[in-house]
Image (cartoon, coloured by chain):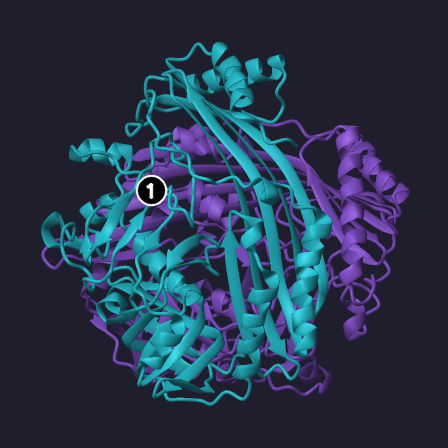
Chain colours: A cyan, B purple
Amino acid sequence: MAILTEDECKALLKKALSYSKADECEVSINGSNSANIRYARNSVSTSGSLSSTSMGISSAFGKKLGIVTLNEYTDEAISAAVKRSEELAQLAPENPEYMPMLGPQTYGPAAATFVPATAAITPAQRTTMVEQSLNIAKQNKLTAAGFLQNSAGFSAMMNSKGLFAYNTSTDINFSVTLRTADSQGSGYSTKGYNDVAKMDTTAFTKIAAQKASGAANARAIEPGKYTVILEPAAGIVLLEQLYGSLDARSADEGRSFLSKPGGKTRLGEKLVDERVNIYSDPSYPDLPTANWSGDGQPLKKMSWIEKGVVKNFNYSRFWAQKKGVQPIPYPSNFIMEGGTQTLDELIKGTEKGILITRLWYIRPVDPQTLLYTGLTRDGTFYIENGQIKFPIKNLRFNESPVIMLNNLDALGRTERTVSGESSQNAMIPPMRIREFTFSSLSDAV
Amino acid sequence: MKRKDFLYLTGMGISASMLSNFTAVGSPRVPGTVLRDVDVALKKRMADVALNAARSKGATYTDARIGRYLNQFVVTRDKNIENVVDTESYGMGIRVIANGCWGFAATDKLDNDSIARAAETAVAIAKENSRIQSEPVQLAPQKGYGEVSWKTPIEKNAFEVPMKEKTDLLLSVNDAAFKNGANYVNSILFFVNEQKYFASTDGSYIDQDIHRVWPVFGVTKIDDKSGKFETRSSLSAPRGMGYEYLMPRESDKIHGVTTLYRDRYDMHEDAAAAALQAAQKLKAKSVVPGKYDLVLDPSHLWLTIHESVGHPSELDRVLGYEANFAGTSFLTLDKWESKKFNFGSKNVNIVADKLQPGSLGAVGYDDEGVATKQWDIIKDGVLVNYQAIRDQAHIIGLKESQGCCYSQSWQDVQFQRMPNISLQPGKTPLSVAQMIKNVENGIYIIGDSSFSIDQQRYNFQFSGQLYYEIKNGKITGMLNDVAYQANTQEFWNSCAAVCDKSDYRLGGSFFDGKGQPMQSSAVSHGSSTALFKGVNVINTARKI
């Protein structure tokens, strides 16, 4: 399937709107081509490709809304779908929280979300990238399991009030776990980009190989509170629980870690260490995204935590209207500012501590304190006097990202990483944290 | 239905345009309409186009899955119906073996040219990847069944129930919670109908119609003065049933410290109890950490079974295919080969079952055309078997697959997924009340909540919905801030008793994640209430 151009999308969406008789009508279309290779035991296991498109039509009469979609774009098919959405709207119950559709919006400059070379990846190219990764595993007598996926897609929307938005994007994501032949050591590496040119599967697999070889014969240490260095792939899975929870409505309603007694919230209060700055920016060069949200609102640079203070909450259009404030859409990316030190420099500056490659199976324990549990995985090492001394067995933690960021000791340089839990990309620095709470030991390698 | 899409679709305050942007996975259709089935003869013709096209390009094996996946959500927030969403996803996935290597491609365009092109793409991918394939795929033999069909034995098709009946039910459920002191209530009805057609070059043409249902709610109670809040989620289980699951029967209720449910669920009654219990949780005493005897209700234990028995006995994990994502397993082949690996106490008998009526995993045939069955995983505490599919069967000396292959949609490749994995009831008559009478210092845990386990399934931590302190054989009050941690093998060896079959119930998950790209599957886990001695309990209270 071809990626539809802006003009092709406009023509198709205008045609759909021309059939509308509703008070308001909104039409969207999106599609993608994606493909992947999964490998394990030093060989390909599964691999596939998928191509699909879809059009969605929303028709509203007052606060009554009907929605249908289709993936056939003849005049007859589109016309019938518009009519069906109108019939449905007339049958639907009124939604008191329905918000009228937006009029024309002004979006900031489009970021470089689409890279032609990524869209043009061939099966042979994909296989070669995996082959390069497998070569590193075999050279080091390690066993590889990994995943490489690339996609190219487009998305557009238009409504009867004059709103139009369009975007194209590409992505390539890679992750690999290498294990020693005796299954006593395991190492991990993951990266994601818009541009295939940045995806060096050889280099990233070498990092995982180094960790795997160094992780064998791990020693057990007593659970307790330790200084830890969270590499970006480890830090992201806890930070995304924090920055993904900055929701105004749940805080106002008293059912959030950001709520205070009597209907008050922590908005404007210092929540974490003053070196913590978290923002979103669709035009951030290393993490470009669409400049509009799913409901057509413009996305722009937005500060969420500034110098440790909760600067903004995410406000849905309904909740913003109810509270008499401007809506703030959920962003398309997150960037946490870092420091100037490399990971090696952070390690050198650590008297005693634990280096953590990856955290796994993150689950909420208590929403009141944002307490989460999970485990270290695929490369956990003890640091003494600025040097990695020996690998250690994995540990279970019970920790809140709020407590963790109050125990911030040092920040490294921000880099793009991928969450092993949500698969989302974000810019995260390595972090050195004091008194990180481990509650038990794991025998898992 | 993918878990993230479910969470997205059922998110509170979802806007119309956000729904429109969801369409890459499932497309909303007109609520209340009953879709006509796709003609089975047409599906056979389309499947044959794929099989023939792949064969002509050099495939030595091909299967084609035509999937039509219907989902319906009714979502409420407090006193409002937030969303009524019907989604439909329809297309074909084609899997081939060429040059001894798997290839896969999917298309939502079901004309002959598009189907043939997808088949050719699958073959091309297989051939390209064969250069990094270490050894050819070895498929267990599978006879062709010809043209056969299977349907979930439902009494009432949820998609045919008028929408008003569903919205009225949920609004009355929320009202019951409010009348009993809740501050906020979210409730959802979620219905699934998978219309799946499978054809392969083995000579099978299998038409299946699968139904699932999941009613769920969350109740929140807030203490304004302290700013504390507590929640209690529904104690329902998702089931492989029709709308009849939501039509309560007294004979399916188990009355105790709270009412529990067998094969029919009283959502209204449970919501009223939940509101009262959320308020009780605000006043419950915080647990003193230490060793306790745990009495685990099936509404809780299903998840412990799922994580600590179901996943580690998946053969693909044992072999290393999930090493990069879900992890491997401590149940390595040497432990199975020894025929004496002590997984648990003699009370622990775990059965895999793809036939169990009312379960989420029940189907007639799996997604590579294998008729389903039942077998032992743990027998009298000893590991005796795994869960395998066609290309793994030879590794553990099986002559045929165990029928554990599944894909969440037509557009994802099928792979090994968990069958229903259940703890068998005790053979000696034993009620929950009798079990509690014999506990000196324990906690009775009902309902599931937080769950986490390491990548080889040794170390886990679980929480529940309700915790009742047991002192000298009696329930003395409610506890809070409870989580228990254990090593899987030690935990199952501490299993001192299992109640008899009169207490047996199913729990389950709609969204068990595994694989890359990650896929969800639905699976049930049954048990009777069970007693575990001397388990480590931690206190999860913190201050920020």
Q: What residue type is labelled 1?
A: Tyr
Res B232 visible: yes
Q: Which of B159 and A204 is in front in this view?
A: A204
Q: Is mark 1 on a helix, strand or loop?
A: loop
> What residue is shown with label 1?
A330
Q: Nearer the viewer, residue B416 or A127?
A: A127
Q: What's the residue at 83%, 32% (across, down)?
A: B45
Across and down, in percent, residue B400 comes to: 82, 64
Rendered-image quadrant of the C terminus of chain B: bottom left
Q: What's the residue at 77%, 74% (across, down)?
A: B396
Across and down, in percent, residue B462 comes to: 41, 70
Q: What's the residue at 87%, 54% (across, down)?
A: B143
Rendered-image quadrant of the N terminus of chain B: top right
Q: Is residue B121 left or right of residue A88?
A: right
Res B506 visible: no
Across and down, in percent, residue B299 comes to: 44, 62
Q: Which chain carries label 1?
A: A
Q: Nearer the viewer, residue A186 or B240?
A: A186
Mark 1 surroundings: few (<14), some (14-19) or many (≥20) residues within 10 A: some
Q: Is residue B174 left or right of residue B305?
A: left
Q: What's the residue at 18%, 53% (across, down)?
A: A259
Across and down, in percent, residue B472 comes to: 30, 84
